[in-house]
Amino acid sequence: MKERKKLTIFILIAFLLPLILVIVQSSLTNACISFVLFGIQAASPTISAAIVLGLSKELYSTVAGELRQKNLIKAVAYPVIITCLTMVLSKAIYCFCFSTEFEICQLSITQFFVVMWALIAEEFGWRGFLEPLLSSMGVHRLLTPCIVGIIWSLWHYHYFLQNKIDAPILWFAIGCIAESYIYSYLMRVTGGNLLSAMIYHFMWNLMLNIVAISPSKNNGIIWPYVILTMLECMIASYIIIRARIDKS
């Protein structure tokens, strides 16, 4: 299957499946079924990538190549360190500037399962399939994370439709692009170990709730989220500059 055809099928399934599930959920009254459908909705990038790779008979080889024990310590340690530092530092800066108490929140059972689902729901689709696909199509390596970040941010439309995300749309999109460079960096330094992206996504969602970054956790105040996004942009800028220096 040609790369452009793979890309088209992937985008269509990844974007249309959540919309269909949102429509179905709106007519349901059973909370358990709605929760299951929400989980499928969240996993649409991975489902889409699996379908495309299955059609081209590349699913097993791709999974085996990206999920391995190579650089396992880095794949776990790096994303944990980056997320904890950026989240805690952003909240600390906010608390210092606005003279508020540093709050640690607990997760509900539902939130816990949603955060755990982040381990496998998305990253096989985004960093495991889409980013390598764009690279194979000849997209510049410094531009690829930006394109993935834009597509990734747009994909979240269904969460905004359901009021599941309360972050400002512009800052959310900027954050997705900046984080995409961090994901790409993690994949690169771990030799393409997809576990690094999976751990980063999990830790990001976990710390977002524990450190209370979202506006809903701060009486509608957006500054903790804005500060976090700015820190992520600084990290992304460093990654880009470092990559350009290394290449030269």
Image (spheres, rainbow, N blue to C red):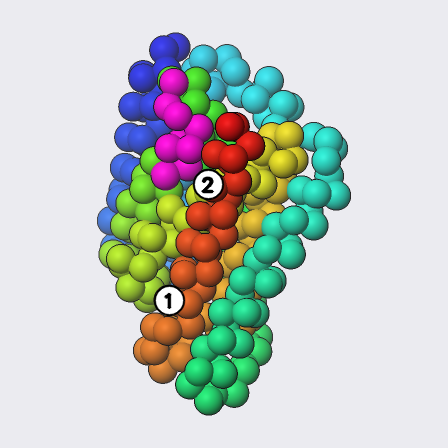
Is 137 placed above or below 162 here?
A: above
Image point (43%, 18%), residue name = 136
Q: Quadrant of residue 139?
A: top left
Element class at badge 2: helix
Q: Residues within 10 Å of mark 1 (few under 14, many from 20)?
A: many
Image point (29%, 64%), residue name = 168
Residue 12 point in image, percent of width and height: 28, 30
Amino acid type of the residue that numbered disc 1 sits on in the rendered structure: Val
Whether residue 27 appears in magenta in the rendering, the answer is no
Whether residue 142 appears in magenta in the rendering, the answer is yes
Residue designated by label 1: 226
Is 232 placed above or below 228 here?
A: above
Front residue of 55 and 78: 78
Image point (70%, 50%), residue name = 77
What range of the chain is rendered magenta?
138-146
Is 64 placed above or below 40 here?
A: above
